Structures are given as structure tokens and as C-alpha cells.
Amino acid sequence: MNNHVSPPEPFCSTNPSYRGKWIQWLDHYWTVSSLDKKPSPCQVDTVIYCMGDKADDIFATFKLAPKKAKIFNIVVVKFNDHFKGNMNIIYERARFNRRCQEEGESIDSSITNLHTLAKNCNFRDLHEELICDRIVVGCTDPKLSLSLQMIPDLTLDGAIRHA
């Protein structure tokens, strides 16, 4: 693989909802740059470097023993715990519930965005039902919306197939 791949933009620690997307970019970078094959201390330094200037300050709050501070899996759990604590479920759910298909946006793209937003909402058992509801009420095609509303046992899979 090419080791000259640019890392993702620095992580925006003031926008916790951005975290999921940034982690996806980091995962892609990890693979294409072959960092998944590097020693753990190199991986730790790389993730802190990729996160940007605030990462060192956050990392310092973990107060890890020097040996543990170089173990990638431990460091990642600490960062995840740190940012998960900053997650505002009400804010995330409001973003999800306001999401409608945008003019000119494909239904596939809209559904993908709903899945992405739902990840931070902690919907538990209602996860698929709530995404299905947003497809029904949030699509730009009123005929499709009405058609979906007329299916009494509509499931998420059914709504996606129908759309």
C-alpha cells in the first residue's frame, strides 16, 4: 500500500456528532497507509497526530502509566470514553428528527444519512422503526410518502425496497 496517503482533517473536538464520521475516515486511512501493521506505539502517536492540537491535552487527562500510554487499544478506549461522555443524546435525536430528504438528494443517500444520524441516538429496540418513520415523513415525494403510509406492517427493509 501507499504510505504517502494524507491523514484525515484534524478531529473537531467541539462537535461530538462529527466523531463517527471522523472515525470512519481514520479507519480508511489506517488501512490504506498500512498503519494497521505498525507497532502499537506508532499507532498511538499517529492517532494523536491525526486528531490535531487538542488531542495531546485530552490524552494528558487520561493519566496512563507510561507502558499503558503506548498500547493502542487502551488509548482508543480512553478517547472513546472521553468523547462519549460529551455526547448530548437530545441534540443528536433532534438532528435525526429534523432530517428530511433534501431537494435533489437521492433516497439512497437520504437513508444512509438517517442511519448515520441514528447511530448517536441510542434508540435501542426502536432503531429500525424510527428510521422507517423518518423515511415515510421525510421523503420529498408526497406520493411515495402516502404509499408507504398505506402499508400497515411496514418495516425498514420494506420501506427501503419500496422507495
Image: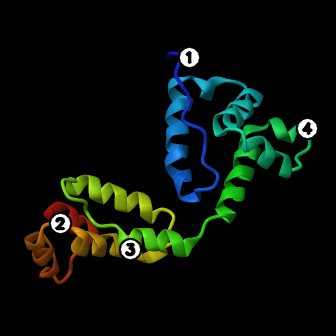
Question: Is the residue under label 1 in contact with that under label 3 (CB below 8 Å)?
Answer: no
Q: Which of marks 2 and 3 precedes in the sequence? A: 3
Residue behind mark 4: 66
Cα–Cα gap, marks 2 and 1: 43 Å
Residue type marked 4: Pro
Under tag 3, what secondary structure? Answer: helix
Is 113 left or right of 105, judged from the image as shown? right
Under tag 4, what secondary structure? Answer: loop
Crowdedness near tag 2: few (<14), some (14–19) or many (≥20) residues, C-alpha within 10 Å: some
Q: Which mark's residue is nearer the viewer, 4 or 3?
A: 3
Crowdedness near tag 3: few (<14), some (14–19) or many (≥20) residues, C-alpha within 10 Å: some
Please identify the quarter of the rendering in which residue 47 is found. top right
Any mark on residue 20, and which?
A: none
Q: Which mark's residue is nearer the viewer, 2 or 1?
A: 2
Residue behind mark 1: 3
Q: Is residue 10 above or below residue 96?
A: above
Spot occupied by residue 11 in the image (x, y as percentages of width and height): 60, 44
Residue behind mark 2: 140
Question: Is the residue under label 2 in contact with that under label 4 (CB below 8 Å)?
Answer: no
Residue behind mark 3: 97
Residue type marked 3: Asn
Front-lying residue, 80 or 126: 80
Residue type marked 2: Thr
Spot occupied by residue 2 in the image (x, y as percentages of width and height): 50, 15
Cα–Cα gap, marks 3 and 2: 15 Å
Spot occupied by residue 61 in the image (x, y as percentages of width and height): 84, 52
Cα–Cα gap, marks 4 and 2: 55 Å
Q: Which of marks 1 and 3 precedes in the sequence? A: 1
